[in-house]
Amino acid sequence: MADNKSFLRKHKATIIYSISLAFLLFLLKWLELRFIIFDHSFEIYIGFIAVIFTALGIWLALKLSKPKINTVVIEKEVYVNRHEGFTLNTAVISQLELSKRELEVLNLMAQGHSNQEIAAKIFVSLSTVKTHNQNLFIKLDVKRRTQAIEKAKRLHIIP
């Protein structure tokens, strides 16, 4: 306790000076804030209104731009007998100049096999299967596997 009193006596002027500087700094900041709030109150109110309307506009835009999609799932049992009454249209095959390997790739594609699985089944490389796919797409004038399968079924090339 004696050390504490001697410290206060020894540094009395420094402590008083520090406290008075802190008080003056507080007073200056308070006056500055008062000046900003009272002299620029109109600008502050306009700024608050702008922020509120900006937030309201963003919220409204997000609310209105959401699509209102109602997804309905309908489950049905579908039985498709693919091979019954199927006759291979050889005229179209010769007209499109489809090779036996391309027909084989097309059949495996229609069964839902990936390129890698097709390559393993017919013992060729993956790039060869991709080449056959591109040739099929060009000959059938399509861009995707699903389109190629659908067009081949329609032309009676595959069951």
Image (cartoon, grey):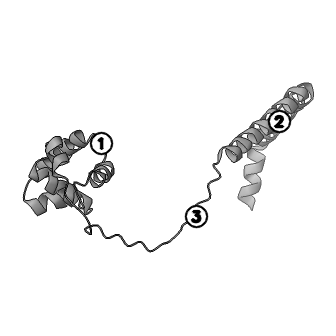
Specify the amino acid type for callout 3. Val
Q: Quadrant of the C terminus?
A: bottom left
Callout in the foreground (2, 1): 1
How far apart are the two marked residues, 3 and 1, measured between alpha carbons?
A: 30 Å
Mark seen at residue 48: 2
Callout in the foreground (3, 1): 1
Secondary structure under tag 2 reads helix
Q: Quadrant of the N terminus?
A: bottom right
Q: Residue sitting at 72 percent across and 50 percent down?
A: 7
Q: Is residue 142 left or right of residue 24?
A: left
Rendering coords of residue 101 (x, y %): 10, 52
- Quadrant housing residue 114: bottom left
Specify the amino acid type for callout 2. Phe
Up/down of 38 relative to 55, above or below: above
Whether pointer 2 and pointer 1 mark residues with C-beta atoms closer than 8 Å, the reply is no
- Quadrant housing residue 22: top right
Specify the amino acid type for callout 1. Val
Rendering coords of residue 11 (x, y %): 74, 43
**Circle 1 sits on which residue?**
142
**Circle 3 sits on which residue?**
72
Q: Which sits earlier in the primary sequence, circle 2 or circle 1?
A: 2
